[in-house]
Image: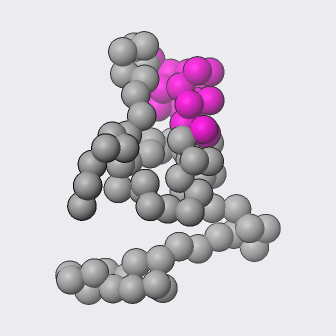
Amino acid sequence: VESVDPSGNFIGHFTTVDGKSPAWMLVQAGLAKVLDSARHAPNYPELLQAQKECQHRRIGIWTNMDDSMQEEPNQNNTE
């Protein structure tokens, strides 16, 4: 746990015993997409790459994806 948000939710990250990020595992399997809120995550580039590969291969949630849906989270947002 790295911090707690104003609502009392824990903020942090964890990995599996072999060092893999569960978030990356879900994105890599096509079961989740990368949100802009993840842009500060240490593995953000890897998450984006995994998502791009799934989109290209049309895996999981990207199976019926229209090419116009293939976009990256907005990296120009400021907090």
**Residue 7 location, x and y as percent?**
20, 81
- Viewer can see residue 26: no
Q: In the rendered view, tell whether residue 23 sits above or below residue 57.
A: below
| Residue drawn at point x = 26 percent, y = 86 percent | 8
Left or right of 64? Residue 21 is right
Q: Quadrant of the C terminus?
A: bottom left
Q: Nearer the viewer, residue 37 or 77?
A: 77
Which colour style is shown?
A: one colour
- Viewer can see residue 66: yes
| 63 inside magenta stretch | yes
- Residue 29: quadrant of the picture: top right
| 56 inside magenta stretch | yes
Stretch of the chain drawn in magenta: 49-64
- Residue 67: quadrant of the picture: top left
Q: How many marks?
A: 0
**Residue 63 location, x and y as percent?**
50, 21
**Residue 49 location, x and y as percent?**
60, 38
| Residue drawn at point x = 46 percent, y = 31 percent | 61
Q: In the rendered view, tell whether residue 4 sits above or below residue 76.
A: below
Q: In the rendered view, tell whether residue 41 sits above or below residue 4.
A: above
| Residue drawn at point x = 49 percent, y = 62 percent | 41
Q: Nearer the viewer, residue 78 or 70?
A: 78
Q: Residue furthest left?
A: 7
| Residue drawn at point x = 60 percent, y = 52 percent | 24
**Residue 58 location, x and y as percent?**
56, 21
Q: Residue furthest top?
A: 67
| Magenta span dominant secondary structure | helix
